[in-house]
């Protein structure tokens, strides 16, 4: 019985012969024949898919020629490279030498294309290949056109996927071939731009055995990184994933990303391989759906099944679509090139009667230059979408991100250069921010059927060693870190505040992390260097981490990554406190500053003087011998301090002045009492030095902790290194500060705040902290650059420091906080009161006294205006005014004593009543008359207030005085 498949194949070839016959018949001698070579690996699925697509493209082109009366006839000459580079090269030479093709389509692989491209350049024949290696550059090879995506075009998309999920490291797995190695530099650079690094490169030979693949996988298991980018061809990738599944690397916590070559061929791999790839993410070119594509797909499936009945699992993929579009692109370019040149080849002649080699016998194409110019820059809407070639390179438009689930793949998002990662090919206007996020894509099922995003790394287990944690060796301050060795087992025992915080942090991690403490010491047990040397050991890969009182510094961060700090930051200075001044015999003077003392004394004298002026004429207590009156001025004013003044003031102006002054004295004495009480009852904690820079100005010595970075800090602040002295323990701190610079010690110790807090807690009565405080980042744990532990440990540090665990650790190592305020740098002082605090009071007292004095003087001058307008000299007038002022006004004095009325009120009544009477000549005026000089002098010396006794009793002046007296009595 005849095989139906073979019968259908014969019918197909018969159909093609009939089509070619009609084409030739219709076009006649005017049809232009263009020979094109096709080199494919016909023993691979991609080769078979490409062959079917190319033949269908030629048929469609011929059919279109019949309809459009086009006179171009492309004849394809197919060659099988048999997956061998030598066979591919031999086929290319045959096509160029014997067939004299105008173009070559293929080959598929980069290794085969490398040599054939050189042949095309030599013969000026375009080589249009799907070879994806970036090492094959259309820019360097003018007759090479890449009709597929360059594998480097997906590097940015892969790096952005890694960045989206917060992974900082990834392992690159690629095959040892031109195809595999070409993407490495591009992917490495793209990841670096996304702050991600390639932690390891796993190179697998295409000829590697299963045992060799297992050996490489076991090596990957021992590493921390759990993110793998696989750039392998399907045959090798299938074996890799099968073995990875066997060793447990397709379980929860792992993340796998495959490149477009493998993703595009997932439909053709075996079901067992797909089962082992569950949870893998992949990239492949996006193909827009269209009715034209749907119709072609149905035709293609039928045709492929007829041509390859032995293949059960197949689907039209991107390589088949690119093969179809490549033929169409070549046909379009040929139509343009034919109009510019005729296709012909010229063989080179025989030289010296000897035949040349096959390479020398290859001629040059007559239309190659015109053809390559057309095909290197072409654009049309093909089956694969926008088929756009620029400078010989097919341009990518968008990638699909797929998740391998079940028996196939599921699309979860897109990546475009414009929008980044998104669940839509063209996001809404509100989403046009190029900021990829894992929330912008669909739900992902990760390896191990987990929906939890892998953190990208794990602590290695089984085959690896523990974390090597370096700790400093110190001779003092065991509260922070102390390293000992067990005398029996010789095991390292690390204790201290820093160590306990580290242990608590590592316990708080969401996974187990094992570690061993390694002291940074010499064989003799001494410290092997300072803290900079200790941190640098991580960079030298001697330690995996460093734990201790290590300060986060900029110069150290060049070599390591620090976690978030777990202590407060800052560098300050410890200085001695002055001796207690309560033993000072003159401490009673300290509550007030000197200017306040002088101002208060001046106001005492001024106020006493004002009251004496106001009371002198009417108050007998303010009269008497000059010595008594001077004593009264001081006595009255100073006695107000204790409110012991017994003298009664008669004048209302005096009362006003005294009331204001007593209030001022009350405020002054109360403030003085409070300040003195504070000085006598509260210990005065004045530092000997108030500023660190005072030490260097005075040439004093400065102490610091041995091995600390403080020396570099002080040097950067222009301190002289010859003034530095180092110490190890708090006891040495105390002794050095107690001695001082003059006795072999120091006058200040510069250290970090955690040490200062602990020191002042022990010696809070003797020392205090002064500024300035230099900012630092605090203590932190150090890890290698790019370590995935840093983010997790930093989060754990926050959890520990914000909770009760840190309080417990602090209490365990540093005890309860004391009530010494000075341990935090506070200085309990009672400063002297200054004049500025009482300016308002003195202003009020001065104005009130001056105002009262001014009123009195105005009244006095008004009463004795006759003296001022007399013809005497200034000296005579002043002498007369002084004598008048010194006389006692007995009437007003008696009236004031009797009724308590001020003398000034009486004078006002005198003035007001006197305006209605005829006054007798004033004795003071008569004093200056030449004819009555002696008589008037007696009147001046013997009569009160300057009124003459020569006046008759019934005179108006006498009446005025009587009226005043009567008026006062009536009041």
Image: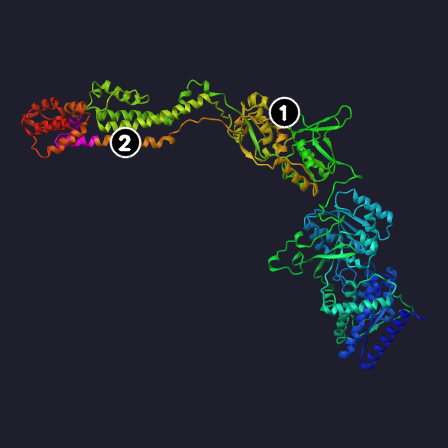
* Badge 1 element: loop
Write down the residue under mark 1: 729
How many neighbours does mark 1 have within 10 angstroms: few (below 14), some (14-19), or many (20 or more)?
some
Mark 2 or 1: in front is 2
Left or right: residue 457 versus residue 659 is right
Q: Is residue 278 within the magenta segment?
A: no
**Figure quadrant of the N terminus:** bottom right
Work out whether residue 382 or residue 745 is closer to the camera in this orientation and state it.
382
Q: For residue 94, which quarter of the picture? A: bottom right
Query: How many marks on residues?
Result: 2
Above or below: residue 224 compared with residue 588: below
How many neighbours does mark 2 have within 10 angstroms: few (below 14), some (14-19), or many (20 or more)?
many
Q: Which residues are magenta?
A: 856-882
Q: Is residue 359 among what the camera can see?
A: no
Left or right: residue 123 versus residue 643 is right
**Figure quadrant of the C terminus:** top left
Q: For residue 466, which quarter of the picture? A: top right
Work out whether residue 194 or residue 803 is closer to the camera in this orientation and state it.
803
- Residue 450 in percent (x, y) is at 73, 48
- Residue 702 in percent (x, y) is at 57, 27
Which colour scheme appears in the figure?
rainbow
Write down the residue under mark 2: 848
- Residue 291 in percent (x, y) is at 73, 69
Q: Is residue 862 within the magenta segment?
A: yes
Q: Is residue 407 among what the camera can see?
A: yes
Q: Earlier in the sequence, mark 2 or mark 1?
A: 1
């Amino acid at each position: 019985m005849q095989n139906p498949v073979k019968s259908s194949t014969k019918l197909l070839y018969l159909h093609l012969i009939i089509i070619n016959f009609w084409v030739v018949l219709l076009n006649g001698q005017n049809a232009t024949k263009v020979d094109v070579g096709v080199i494919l690996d016909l023993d691979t699925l991609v080769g078979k898919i490409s062959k079917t697509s190319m033949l269908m493209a030629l048929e469609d082109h011929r059919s279109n020629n019949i309809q459009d009366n086009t006179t171009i006839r492309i004849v394809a000459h197919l060659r099988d490279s048999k997956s061998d580079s030598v066979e591919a090269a031999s086929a290319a030479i045959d096509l160029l030498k014997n067939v004299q093709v105008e173009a070559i389509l293929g080959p598929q692989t980069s290794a085969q294309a490398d040599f054939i491209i050189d042949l095309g350049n030599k013969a000026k024949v375009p080589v249009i290949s799907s070879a994806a290696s970036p090492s094959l550059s259309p820019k360097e090879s003018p007759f090479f056109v890449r009709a597929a995506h360059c594998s480097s075009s997906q590097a940015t998309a892969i790096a952005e996927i890694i960045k989206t999920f917060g992974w900082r490291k990834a392992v690159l797995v690629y095959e040892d071939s031109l195809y595999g190695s070409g993407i490495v530099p591009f992917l490495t650079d793209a990841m670096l731009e996304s702050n991600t690094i390639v932690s390891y490169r796993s190179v697998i030979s295409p000829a590697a055995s299963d045992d060799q693949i297992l050996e490489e996988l076991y090596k990957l298991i021992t590493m921390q990184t759990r993110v793998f980018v696989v750039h392998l061809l399907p045959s090798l990738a299938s074996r890799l994933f099968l073995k990875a599944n066997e060793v447990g690397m397709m379980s929860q916590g792992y993340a796998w990303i495959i490149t477009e070559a493998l993703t595009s061929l997932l439909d053709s791999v075996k079901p067992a391989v797909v089962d082992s790839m569950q949870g893998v993410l992949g990239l492949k070119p996006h193909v827009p759906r269209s009715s034209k594509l749907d119709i072609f797909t149905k035709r293609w499936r039928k045709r492929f099944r007829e041509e390859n009945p032995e293949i059960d699992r197949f689907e039209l993929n991107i390589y088949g679509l690119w093969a179809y579009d490549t033929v169409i692109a070549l046909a379009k370019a040929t139509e343009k090139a034919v109009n510019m040149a005729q296709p012909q080849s010229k063989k080179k002649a025989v030289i010296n009667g000897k035949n040349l080699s096959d390479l020398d016998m290859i001629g040059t194409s007559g239309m190659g230059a015109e053809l390559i110019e057309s095909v290197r820059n072409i654009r049309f809407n093909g089956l694969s979408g926008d088929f756009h070639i620029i400078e010989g390179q097919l341009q990518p438009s968008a990638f699909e991100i797929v998740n391998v689930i079940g028996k196939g793949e599921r699309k979860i998002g897109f990546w475009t250069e414009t929008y980044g990662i998104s669940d839509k090919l063209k996001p809404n206007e509100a989403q046009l921010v190029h900021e990829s996020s894992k929330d912008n894509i669909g739900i992902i099922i990760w390896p191990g059927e987990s929906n939890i995003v892998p953190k990208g790394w794990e602590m290695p287990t089984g085959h690896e060693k523990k974390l090597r944690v370096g700790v400093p060796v110190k001779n003092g301050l065991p509260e922070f870190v102390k390293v000992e060795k067990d005398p029996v087992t010789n095991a390292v025992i690390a204790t201290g505040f820093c160590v306990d915080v580290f242990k608590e942090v590592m316990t708080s991690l969401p996974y187990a992390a094992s570690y061993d403490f390694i002291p940074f010491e010499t064989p003799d047990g001494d410290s092997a260097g300072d803290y900079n040397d200790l941190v640098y050991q991580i960079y030298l890969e001697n330690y995996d981490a460093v734990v201790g009182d290590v300060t986060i510094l900029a110069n150290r961060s060049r070599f390591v990554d620090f976690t978030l700090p777990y202590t407060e930051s800052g560098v300050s200075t410890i200085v001695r406190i002055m001796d207690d001044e309560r033993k000072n015999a003159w401490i009673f003077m300290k509550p007030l500053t000197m200017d306040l003392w002088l101002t208060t004394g001046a106001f005492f004298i001024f106020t006493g003087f004002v009251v004496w002026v106001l009371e002198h004429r009417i108050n007998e207590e303010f009269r008497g011998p000059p010595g008594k009156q001077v004593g009264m001025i001081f006595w009255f004013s100073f006695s107000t301090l204790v409110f012991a003044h017994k003298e009664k003031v008669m004048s209302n102006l005096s009362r006003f002045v005294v009331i204001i002054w007593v209030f001022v004295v009350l405020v002054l004495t109360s403030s003085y009492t409070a300040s003195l009480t504070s000085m006598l009852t509260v210990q005065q904690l004045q530092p000997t030095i108030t500023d660190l820079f005072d030490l260097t100005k005075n040439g004093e010595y400065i102490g610091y902790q041995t091995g600390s970075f403080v020396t570099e800090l002080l040097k950067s602040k222009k301190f002289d290194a010859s003034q530095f002295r180092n110490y190890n323990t708090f006891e040495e701190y105390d002794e050095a500060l107690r001695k001082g610079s003059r006795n072999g010690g120091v006058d200040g110790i510069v250290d970090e705040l955690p040490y200062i807090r602990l020191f002042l807690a022990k010696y809070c009565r003797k020392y205090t902290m002064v500024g300035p405080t230099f900012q630092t980042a605090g203590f932190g744990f150090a890890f290698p650059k790019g370590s995935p532990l840093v983010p997790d440990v930093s989060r754990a540090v926050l959890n520990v420091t914000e909770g009760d665990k840190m309080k417990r650790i602090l209490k365990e190592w540093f005890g309860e906080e004391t009530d010494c305020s000075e341990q935090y740098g506070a200085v309990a002082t009672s400063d002297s009161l200054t004049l500025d605090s009482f300016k308002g009071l003195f202003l009020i007292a001065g104005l009130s006294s001056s105002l009262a004095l001014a009123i009195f003087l105005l009244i006095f001058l008004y009463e004795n205006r006759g003296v001022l307008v007399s013809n005497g000299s200034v000296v005579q007038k002043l002498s007369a005014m002084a004598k008048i002022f010194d006389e006692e006004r007995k009437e007003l004095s008696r009236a004031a004593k009797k009724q308590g009325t001020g003398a000034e009120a009486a004078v006002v009544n005198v003035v007001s009543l006197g305006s209605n009477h005829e006054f007798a000549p004033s004795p003071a005026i008569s004093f200056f008359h030449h004819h009555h000089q002696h008589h008037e002098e007696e009147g001046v010396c013997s009569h009160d207030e300057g009124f003459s006794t020569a006046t008759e009793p019934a005179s108006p002046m006498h009446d005025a005085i009587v009226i005043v007296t009567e008026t006062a009595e009536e009041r």
